[in-house]
Image (spheres, grey):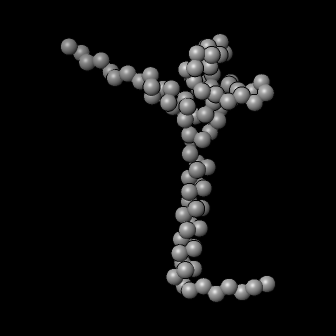
């Protein structure tokens, strides 16, 4: 086994970078936009029917992934769908 000697500053820089990578990985795992919902979860979340979900996929309203017969939706795509259909409240005259 080989012994490697580092200056204190170089060692501290390496440790700082490792901490940053660890933090980034932890945040990535907690990021809800990277979560996938299956079709049933999507239907329940949006309170829609299976047929409506199918129509939205067919019409390109929502992006999805399909593995075999299983369909998945990325949470960030669901958020985009809701954001793109957001309307401001009407003012009373």
Residue at the spot 45% in from the left edge and 28% down from the top edge: 83
In this view, 24 is above or below 53: below
Q: Is residue 20 left or right of residue 67?
A: left
Picture quarter containing residue 35? top right
Can you give x and y, in whole percent of width and height, for residue 75 in the image? 58, 34
In this view, 34 is above or below 9: above
Can you give x and y, in whole percent of width and height, for residue 12 in the image? 54, 78
Identify the image quadrant of the C terminus.
top left
**Furthest residue toward left:** 93
Can you give x and y, in whole percent of width and height, for residue 79 in the image? 51, 31
Front in this rendered view, residue 40 or 70: 70
In this view, 2 is above or below 51: below
Q: Is residue 3 left or right of residue 14?
A: right
Q: Is residue 31 left or right of residue 90?
A: right
Say if residue 48 shows up in the picture.
Answer: no
Residue at the spot 68% in from the left edge and 25% down from the top edge: 39
Can you give x and y, in whole percent of width and height, for residue 90 in the image? 30, 17
């Amino acid at each position: 086994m080989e012994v490697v000697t580092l200056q204190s500053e170089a060692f501290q820089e390496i440790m700082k970078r490792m901490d940053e990578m660890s933090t980034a990985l932890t945040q990535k795992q907690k990021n809800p936009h990277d979560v996938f919902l299956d079709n049933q979860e999507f239907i329940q979340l949006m309170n829609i029917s299976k047929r409506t979900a199918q129509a939205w996929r067919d019409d390109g309203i929502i992006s999805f992934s399909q593995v075999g017969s299983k369909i998945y939706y990325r949470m960030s795509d669901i958020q985009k769908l809701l954001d793109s259909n957001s309307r401001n409240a009407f003012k009373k005259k």
